[in-house]
């Protein structure tokens, strides 16, 4: 039998499984942290921006109420140079320090009555709805954006600016609009400061939550490993007990029943030769019946525990399955890996799968051609048996003729594998089995055959 590759110790495998589970848990936690933290960071950034704009709005409103409003006199509205110079001096501290980059005062008709840019004074622009609402008592507004409007000819190249509109009143009580522009970098700096103060505690809190969940996750993985180990031990015990029982039954049939019947057949042959002539036909028929029974029992012992599996190895034992089919005129082709690797229990299971599929094809499907394909990759063994028999309807429920497949399905299920049967009346049968087990490597074997074309149309695993 082909020797399996090196198998790590169970403790090493368990540690690797825990490490893999922990790595997956941490990866999933890191992804979750990113998914949770990203929208929170954007939300904080937006809130910081709104907070900075609110501060700019409040400052502008205070300037409008306490500084600009008392200086909007009839002389200023008449463009008196002294009145304009006085307002320039009062607003100079905000302009020279860079707190404000542009200042405008609008009247209710859209005319610029004051600006630190003297060329704008006297220009008139069309009033929009927001301006009329502000003049009627609406709240001050603040935005952060690039300035591209017609009245922003001097601000269009300054990048992002904070634009604030606040309502003010002249000395005579007329409603005015006080407009200021300030650098957007101030808002961005405040955003950055808020983010830097909020992100560390958020990330640390999420990381602490992740670590707090890590230890229960490790305990859960170890508990699952314990259950899996118990299940595997029970399954192994059941397989070994079944194997031992098969050995014992085969041994008892071979050593006792078959030997006794063989001896009785020899005795009948002797009586046939030496007995009364009129009883010779009776002895002959009895001898032939006994010999046929012995052959049947020997075949049964071979099926219970095939001796050639130990002697020839799995690949050789599978090859020998072709002889009975060829004797019946059934064409059998096999596609096997160059190195068919399996331990003793897995080899016995693979052999039983192929043998039972061949029994189904020859006895129940009346097939004239059978194709067997076995592949191994990534610690998975796949077996496909295709025949051109008359097929059956898997959804009609299993019948007595497929009792062996029912038992085989249970055995494969207990071994952690899957059994798929595709068949339909008149279209043959495909039996596909997948078993987890050792293989030579995760790479494709040289000369790996292509998947055979499917014959059946329906799929079922109800056996």
Image (cartoon, rainbow, N blue to C red):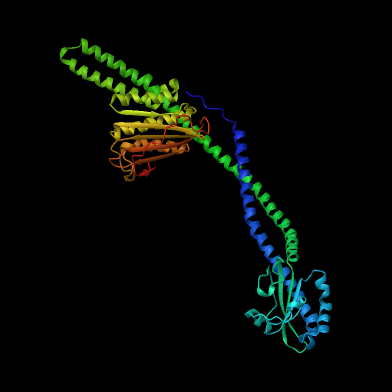
Q: In this rendering, is residue 380 above or below 155?
A: above
Q: Judge by depth and name the residue closer to the eye, 160 or 282.
A: 160
Taking the image as shown, residue 37 lies to the left or right of residue 171, namely left
Q: Judge by depth and name the residue closer to the eye, 338 or 429.
A: 338
Q: Is residue 238 visible?
A: no
Q: Which quadrant would residue 413 be assigned to in this image?
A: top left
Q: In this rendering, is residue 453 above or below 137?
A: above
Q: In this rendering, is residue 309 above or below 181?
A: above
Q: Position of residue 223 (x, y in %)?
A: 59, 43
Q: Residue furthest front?
A: 119
Residue at (35% x, 35% y) in the render: 386
Q: Position of residue 348 (x, y in %)?
A: 44, 28
Q: Residue furthest bottom?
A: 172
Taking the image as shown, residue 365 lies to the left or right of residue 121, namely left
Q: Position of residue 257 (x, y in %)?
A: 34, 21
Q: Which quadrant would residue 154 be assigned to in this image?
A: bottom right
Q: Which quadrant would residue 8 be assigned to in this image?
A: top right
Disc count in the image? 0
Q: Residue furthest top?
A: 274
Taking the image as shown, residue 1 lies to the left or right of residue 116, namely left
Residue at (59% x, 35% y) in the render: 13
Q: Is residue 207 visible?
A: yes
Q: Judge by depth and name the residue closer to the eye, 322 or 58.
A: 58
* Rendered-image quadrant of the C terminus: top left
Q: Position of residue 88 (x, y in %)?
A: 82, 78
């Amino acid at each position: 039998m082909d020797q399996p590759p090196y198998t790590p110790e169970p403790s090493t495998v368990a540690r690797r499984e825990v490490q893999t589970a922990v790595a997956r848990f941490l990866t999933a936690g890191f992804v979750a942290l990113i998914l949770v933290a990203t929208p929170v960071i954007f939300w904080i950034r937006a809130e910081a921006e709104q907070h900075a704009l609110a501060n700019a709005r409040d400052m502008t409103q205070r300037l409008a109420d306490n500084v600009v409003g008392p200086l909007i006199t009839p002389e200023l509205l008449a463009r008196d140079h002294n009145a304009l110079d006085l307002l320039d001096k009062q607003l100079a501290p905000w302009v020279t320090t860079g707190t404000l980059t542009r200042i405008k005062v609008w009247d209710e008709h859209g005319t610029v009555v004051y600006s630190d840019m003297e060329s704008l004074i006297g220009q008139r622009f069309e009033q929009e709805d927001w301006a009329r609402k502000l003049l009627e008592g609406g709240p001050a507004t603040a935005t952060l954006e690039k300035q591209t409007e017609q009245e922003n000819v001097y601000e269009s190249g300054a990048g992002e600016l904070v634009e604030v509109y606040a309502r003010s009143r002249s000395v005579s009580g007329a409603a005015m609009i006080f407009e200021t522009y300030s650098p957007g970098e101030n808002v961005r700096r405040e955003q950055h400061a808020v983010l830097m103060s909020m992100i560390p505690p958020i990330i640390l809190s999420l990381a602490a939550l992740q670590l707090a969940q890590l230890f229960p996750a490790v305990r859960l993985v170890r508990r699952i490993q314990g259950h899996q180990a118990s299940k595997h031990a029970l399954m192994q015990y059941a397989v070994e007990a079944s194997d031992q029982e098969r050995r014992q039954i085969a041994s008892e049939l071979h050593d006792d029943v078959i030997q006794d019947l063989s001896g009785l057949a020899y005795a009948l042959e002797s009586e046939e030769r030496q007995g009364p002539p009129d009883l010779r036909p009776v002895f002959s028929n009895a001898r032939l019946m006994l010999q046929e029974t012995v052959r049947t029992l020997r075949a049964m012992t071979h099926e219970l525990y095939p001796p050639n599996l130990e002697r020839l190895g799995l690949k050789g034992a599978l090859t020998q399955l072709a002889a009975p089919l060829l004797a019946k005129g059934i064409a059998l082709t096999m596609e096997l890996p160059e190195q068919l690797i399996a331990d003793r229990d897995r080899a016995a299971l693979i052999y039983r799968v192929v043998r039972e599929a061949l029994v189904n094809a020859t006895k129940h499907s009346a097939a004239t051609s059978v194709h067997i394909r076995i592949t191994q990759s990534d610690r998975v063994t796949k077996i496909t048996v295709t025949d051109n028999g008359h097929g059956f309807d898997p959804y009609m429920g299993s019948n007595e003729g497929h009792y062996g497949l029912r038992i085989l399905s249970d055995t494969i299920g207990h071994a952690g594998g899957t059994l798929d049967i595709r068949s339909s009346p008149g279209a043959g049968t495909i039996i596909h089995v997948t078993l987890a087990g050792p293989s030579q490597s995760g790479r494709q074997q040289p000369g790996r055959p292509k998947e055979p074309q499917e014959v059946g149309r329906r799929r079922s695993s109800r056996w």
